[in-house]
Image: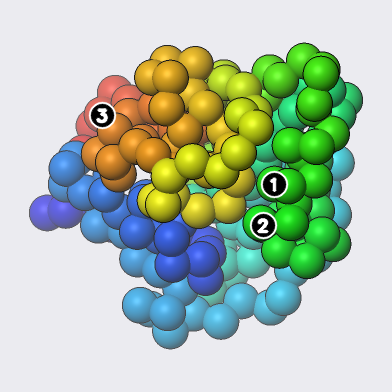
Amino acid sequence: MAFEVVLSTNNKHKLQEVREILSPHGITVYGLNDLNLHPDDVEENGKDYYENALIKARSVQKLTSLPVIADDSGIEVAALDNKPGLHSARYADECGGYDNAMATIIKAVEGKDRSARFMCYIVAVNLEDKPLCFEGIAEGEIIDHQDGSLGFGYDPVFRSKETGETFSAMSAKEKNIYSHRALALKKFVTYLKVNGKI
């Protein structure tokens, strides 16, 4: 029998990405709409990625007995004191969208350290008595233009240290090896295998 898990998100891009990463391991990933789950609006007011992911996971935990995973992620730019980081999505909103946010970041790093990293924390509940946490970090740099038409969010300006390509220029298959979310989910899969759940 397949292992089933609920992803606490309404972001269709994120849901598709997580499904593509986990399905080869026999894991069925449900989105909130798939199970008609409607958690209360949550305020992501945690002091770090872990707390924000936990807030999202707990909001869905009340509604299902299935294992629930939630992620919180962000891009940290060295020249901006590792911002926008935790507030990456909010930063894009404040800039009037991701295109404007990326243009602002490109301008801010001109002549400065271009190094950056994507951070992802996956929190899982309904598996053990306490929440489980899995971290993924993808190192890279900010380039001076948008490159690629795939991916989403800040992917077009983030060049992976591993591949020399932006996340937006990579195929989904390649990104699902090197991305911060893929690295965190790989640890989640390892946990499930070690504990005989898959």
Query: Relative to residue 96, is residue 46 depicted above or below?
Result: above
Q: Which residue is mark 1?
A: 102
Could you give the CA–CA distance between mark 3 and mark 2, rounded to whole angstroms? 37 Å
Q: Verify CB contact (< 8 Å) between mark 1 and mark 2.
A: yes
Q: Could you say which quadrant of the image residue 50 lies in?
A: top right
Picture disc at residue 193: 3
Is label 3 or label 1 in front?
1
Residue at the image position 29 percent from the left and 33 percent from the top: 174
Q: Foreground: 84 or 115?
A: 115
Label 2 amino acid? Tyr
Looking at the rendered structure, the secondary structure element under dot 3 is helix
Residue at x-position 82% and y-position 59%: 95
Tag 1: amino acid: Met
**Residue 66, label in figure:** none
Pinpoint residue 11: horizontal percent, then vertical percent: 51, 66
The amino acid at mark 3 is: Lys
